[in-house]
Image: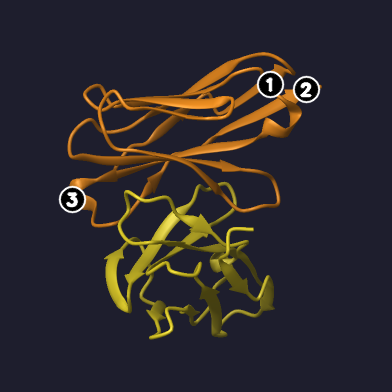
Amino acid sequence: DSGVTQTPKHLITATGQRVTLRCSPRSGDLSVYWYQQSLDQGLQFLIQYYNGEERAKGNILERFSAQQFPDLHSELNLSSLELGDSALYFCASSEGTSNQPQHFGDGTRLSIL
Amino acid sequence: ILNVEQSPQSLHVQEGDSTNFTCSFPSSNFYALHWYRWETAKSPEALFVMTLNGDEKKKGRISATLNTKEGYSYLYIKGSQPEDSATYLCAFLGYNAGNMLTFGGGTRLMVKP
């Protein structure tokens, strides 16, 4: 058990809808990272927050947004969903900077019908 | 676009065999290299974070070396066991990348009993 909690585990919705994925980091970790793993693709970095502030941004679509709250949990919001957004979304956390290991949650599997 | 390559893509070995695989990354602007182990239906688990040229890290039967000047890292598994079957991912962090890890495609290891 990594100590990182992601909810829900599975989400099935339709095109055009909006969903929110939630992540609670490991106790004491200030950084939260979001990743997307689509079919036949590796882990793609989306965005990182550190202690409530955005620190790094990858190839995150404009339809996607995230935030980290004062209690350090984070939410990833995906809107105007398309079939291609179907993927496994991972959250990871670390104590601080990226020369520290990241601890991954079990992921949320999003299926768009 | 950063090029992080892992080879081979997949590897089948017999129980008891020792094995190794490679992660190649840009040799300029190196900051850190991460290794993760990802078992099927689970989440990635941190193995090592390597930051110094010539670094060598060990965890049980698994060890890793780092050459930042030529841009490669080797992961070794001594006396492979069926429970070592997993995908092994490396991820590169450059100085100019903020905190964004770029993952390789992984090496899928299958150990036959």
Residues at marks 1 and 2 on the same chain: yes
Residue contact at pointers 1 and 2, CB within 8 angstroms: yes
| Chain label for disc 2 | B
Res B77 → quadrant:
top right
Left/right placement of residue B69 relative to residue A1 reads left
Q: Nearer the viewer, residue A99 or B20?
A: A99
Q: Nearer the viewer, residue A51 or B44?
A: A51
Q: What secondary structure is found at the residue carrying circle 2?
A: strand
- Residue bearing mark 1: B12
| Chain label for disc 1 | B
Amino acid type at image mark 3: Asn
Q: Which chain is orange?
A: B
Vertical order, B56 against A52 (above or below):
above
- Residue bearing mark 2: B112
Q: At x 66% / y 17%, what residue is drawn?
A: B79
Q: At x 65% / y 76%, what residue is drawn?
A: A8
State the mark number for residue A50.
none
Whole-angstrom CA distance, mark 1 to mark 2, is 7 Å
> How crowded is the residue under tag 1: few (<14 C-alpha within 10 Å), some, or many (20+)?
few
Quadrant (top left/top right/bottom left/bottom right) for the N terminus of chain A: bottom right
Q: Colour of chain A?
A: yellow
Amino acid type at image mark 2: Lys
Res A54 → quadrant:
bottom left
